[in-house]
Image (cartoon, rainbow, N blue to C red):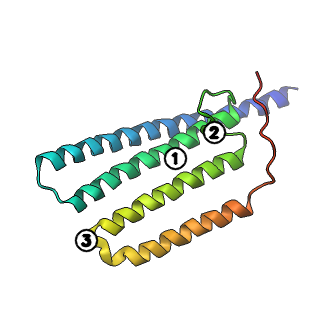
Amino acid sequence: MMMKMLFGATRYAVLIPSLASILGALLLMALGSYEMVLVIIDSITSESSLKESIVSVLTAVDAILLGTVLLVIGYGLFELFIDDELPVPLWLRVYDLDDLKSKLIGVVVAIIAVVFVGIFVDANRSADVISYGVGAGALVVGLAIFAYATKKEPKSKPPKSL
C-alpha cells in the first residue's frame, strides 16, 4: 500500500516541467508581442522596406508560435499527469499522449511554414530557398509519416469525471 502511494505521488514530478514550459511560453509570447509592436512602430516612423517588415513580423510570429508549443506541452503534461479537469478550450484537451503528439506536430508544422516563408521573402537568403524548402518539406513529410505510423485506432474519448 505504501509503495503504491509512493509511485502514485511521483506523477507530481511533472509539475516542475509543466510550470517551466508555461513560464517559457509566456516569456516567448511576451517577447514576440513586444517585437511585433517594435516592428509596427518602426514601419510607421521609418522607411523600412516591405520585405524587412515581413521578415521582422514573421520572426515575431515565430516566437509566438514557439510559445504556443510550450504552452501546449505545459498544459498537456499537467492535464495528463496531475489534473484532467484543467479549464482549457476543447481543442486543447489532452486525453492521452497521442493527443499531445498530434497537437505538437500541428504547431511544429505551422512554425516550419513561418520560418520557410521568412526565408522565402528575405532577399539576403534567396539562394537558400530551395535547400530550406526541400528540408522543410522533408521534415513535414517525416512528421506526417510518424503521425500516421504511430496513430492508434480511434476510440471514443473517455468522459471527463465529475
- Marks counted in the figure total 3
Marking on residue 112: none
In the displayed structure, 6 sits above or below 99; it is above
Is residue 135 depicted above or below 114 in this figure?
below
Query: 10 Å neighbourhood of mark 1: few (<14), some, or many (≥20)?
Result: many
Image quarter where the C terminus lies is top right
Q: Secondary structure at mark 2?
A: helix
Task: Please name the residue shown 60% across and 39% down the image.
Answer: 92
- Label located before the other in sequence (1 or 3): 1
- Residue 6: x and y, percent? 78, 30
* Disc 1/disc 3 C-alpha distance (Å): 29 Å
Residue 77 numbered tag: 2
Q: Residues within 10 Å of mark 3 (few under 14, many from 20)?
A: few
Front residue of 124/18: it is 124
CA–CA distance between discs 1 and 2?
12 Å
Classed neighbour count for the residue bearing mark 2: other residues with Cα under 10 Å, few (<14), some (14–19), many (≥20)? many
Residue carrying label 3: 124
Name the residue located 71 percent from the left edge and 62 percent from the top edge.
148
Snapshot quadrant of residue 18? top right
In front: mark 1 or mark 2? Answer: 1
Query: Given the image, on which type of amino acid does mark 2 rest?
Result: Leu
The amino acid sitting under disc 3 is Asn
Instruction: Mark 1 and mark 3 in contact? Answer it, CB < 8 Å.
Output: no
Residue 69 has which mark?
1
